[in-house]
Amino acid sequence: MPHYDAIVIGTGQSGPALARRLVAAGRKVAVVERKFFGGTCVNTGCTPTKTMIASAYAAHLARRAADYGVTIGGPVGIDMKAVKARKDAVVGASRGGVERSLKTLDGCTVYEGHARFTAAKAVAVGDTTLTADQIFINVGGRAVVPPIPGLDQVPYLTNSSMMEVDFLPDHLVILGGSYVGLEFAQMFRRFGSRVTVIELGPRLIVREDEDVSRAVAAFLTDEGIDIRTDSKVVGVEKQRDDVAVTIEAAGKKSQVVGSHVLVAIGRQPNTDDLGLDKAGIKVDARGFIEVDDQLRTSVPGIWAIGDCNGRGAFTHTSYNDFEIVAGNLLDNETRSVRDRINAYALYTDPPLGRAGMTEADVRKAGRPALIATWQMEDVSRAYEKGETKGFMKVLVDRDSKQILGASLLGLSGDEVIHTLLDLMYARAPYTVMQRAVHIHPTVAEFVPTMLGELKPLE
């Protein structure tokens, strides 16, 4: 039984970084990876999807070339094999970089295979059992496949299998109107597919404010995407070469017939086949590993980091998990997941940048607050670029003057949100930014202007 100071299971965003820090601190480390180095982000998430979104944006902009006085001869064509090849090249470089960095790291031994606990401090990989005083679980998650009648009898796609698509679906039917589903919806519509989005809830991206949901639905509809909300999928069946999706809305049933179906209704952790019960590691009802605010599991000496712990579902939160664990273990710091502010983005075009509380959150909490909004059509940079859809909204605590949250839906919203996020981490009053002089012409220059328009939230 090879013994190590630490075992890292999985090579998503937090595992490799933690392995490097542990080795630098003089620890003997084993890293276990059962499939692709780099985890979801590199292989089936951020890296490939944003690469494909860039291709879709190029196609969209080419179709609009005449708006900018640019003439392109003939219709815009899409070579899906070339789109996929470009994506594969970007992913391959990222994946290879992670793999090389670990396999050439002195003090680190890489095991390729499936890890399963056999005891609290023992992990089997194939015929080899590894032991360690400290174990870090970084196994990520995968798409939820719901128990819809007939779904198991038809071919369907998930965010992972979509990465192998090198053709243009004639009609892509997407089950789920949230972040993953909407990014694929706009992407493939811009490639040329017909797209239908079916959402069980009353509106798209239900965790966002209603005005955000309405605006996103409006620009997706403008691009020709068929959106069905308040629609429950009650059955799926093969219909010749197509797939028929039966939905129930307002008490009536109807069918949407598409060439392909993408399931995008949520994520679940990759914890069901790790032998966690053999180690006594507790999980919740959804399979997420239960951790405290410092990411320690129910078993001393074992931590869960990244998507599998249910305390964050993003690359940036996974990396922050590494920072929290490393800070507490190696830097004599006291760090906690409670220190971070909820922030993320929806990478449609235009994108949505989010930080902190929504307007609905503030109202529900009953906090005295101020609110300001600014339409993107009144942002000079957006007007000049011909990309004026969306709006910006910020909420401020009336008494402390600290920013409570912001929703920036529009050109560069995913970047501009950080100006507000940094101010929130500094716990500074909004007046600091209101008095700042930003560069013209940019989108960010209108954030101080917007803060000058704050009014009581009624």
Image: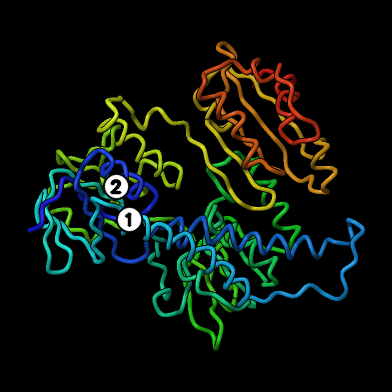
Check whether the beta carbons of the residues at disc 2 and disc 1 lie within 8 A of each other: yes
Badge 2 crowding class, 10 Å Cα cut-off, few under 14, some 14 to 19, many 20 or more, is many
Q: Residue at x 11, y 61 (%)?
A: 129
Q: Position of residue 37 (x, y in %)?
A: 37, 61
Relative vertical location of residue 364 with respect to residue 105 in this rendering, above or below: above
Q: Position of residue 376 (x, y in %)?
A: 77, 39
Mark 2: which amino acid?
Ala
Q: Quadrant of residue 337?
A: top left
Of the residues under marks 2 and 1, which one precedes in the sequence? 2
Q: Residue at x 58, y 62 (%)?
A: 184
Q: Which residue is mark 2?
A: 19
Relative vertical location of residue 228 with respect to residue 390 in this rendering, above or below: below
Q: Secondary structure at mark 2?
A: helix
Mark 1: which amino acid?
Leu
Q: Residue at x 32, y 49 (%)?
A: 15
Q: Is residue 272 left or right of residue 400?
A: left
Q: Quadrant of residue 50?
A: bottom right
Q: Nearer the viewer, residue 183 or 411?
A: 411
Q: Nearer the viewer, residue 427 or 133?
A: 133
Relative vertical location of residue 451 with respect to residue 127 in this rendering, above or below: above
The furthest residue to the top: 399
Q: Which mark is residue 102?
A: 1
Q: Is residue 285 left or right of residue 370?
A: left
Q: Residue at x 34, y 29 (%)?
A: 336
**Total marks drawn?**
2
Q: The N terminus lies in which quarter of the figure?
A: bottom left
Q: Nearer the viewer, residue 293 or 126?
A: 126
Q: Quadrant of residue 188?
A: bottom right
Relative vertical location of residue 73 with respect to residue 413 in this rendering, above or below: below
